[in-house]
Image (cartoon, grey):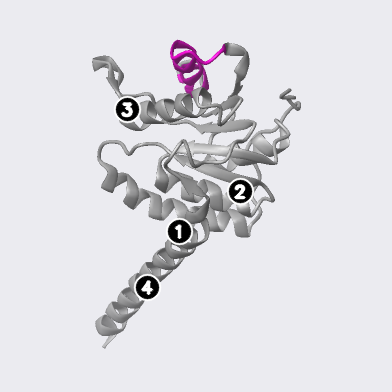
Amino acid sequence: MLLRWIRNIVLLSALLLVIIVWGINYIVISTTNNQLYSSVKDIPKNKVGLLLGTSKYTDKAKDLINAYYQNRIDAAVALYMAGKIDYIIVSGDNRTRYYNEPLLMKEDLIARGVPANRIYMDKAGYRTLDSILRCRDIFGQRQFTIISQPFHNQRAVYIANHKNVAVVAFNAAKGDSYWDVAIREKLARVKMALDLLTNKQAMRYGPKIAIP
């Protein structure tokens, strides 16, 4: 009897978890899809594009570039060259002197023809939530374009919608091992929901940075 009771509890808990994950995922997708664009021609113009960071390398020793990273750089360059954004904020992790996502993104954007004075670095974009809040509160932007892969854009746009920021998002091409990333994204959305419910703030703020 006890074993049956324990088994039922486990099964019900697993079912509840599946329902929660599915429900949050459905809400995020259904409420953000009309703000996501895959065409440079169709996306509205904004002054600022927020390029969300990720690791540049899948294997730095072998100089293997992360396709997610490269595709985001390509997307940001395409938007800038088409005149759909005037400035780019590169937001990512810079917790140590040996790991600096914003600097790498800035260097690669410059190498592709984006002027250095059109790029601003956000070195405290530790999480997507941080990147959105800091773009609003540090860089003073309440309307901007988010640049990442579709699954990431959906979560970022959902956060922005709940933080009184008017955004659209541009979908970079997908990367390798997309399904593995997509599964992790489902769990990230549960964490996102908890952060929004508890009004979690950015891990670090600081002096305001004005963009002309």
Q: Look at the image and give the residue range highlighted in magenta.
A: 99-115
Residue labelled with disc 4:
13
- As helix, strand or loop, the secondary structure at mark 2 comes to helix
Q: Position of residue 202 (x, y in %)?
A: 64, 40
**Above or below, comparing residue 39 to residue 112 in the picture:** below
Residue labelled with disc 3:
66
* 76 is within the stretch colored magenta: no
Residue labelled with disc 2:
160
Q: Quadrant of the N terminus?
A: bottom left
Question: Distance from label 1 to label 4 (Cα)?
Answer: 24 Å
The amino acid sitting under disc 1 is: Ile
Earlier-in-chain disc, 4 versus 3:
4
Decide: few, some or many residues near mark 4? Use Cα within 10 Å; few <14, some 14-19, many ≥20: few
The amino acid sitting under disc 4 is: Ser
Earlier-in-chain disc, 1 versus 2:
1
* Residue mark closest to the camera, 1 vs 3: 1
- Residue 29: mark in rendering: 1
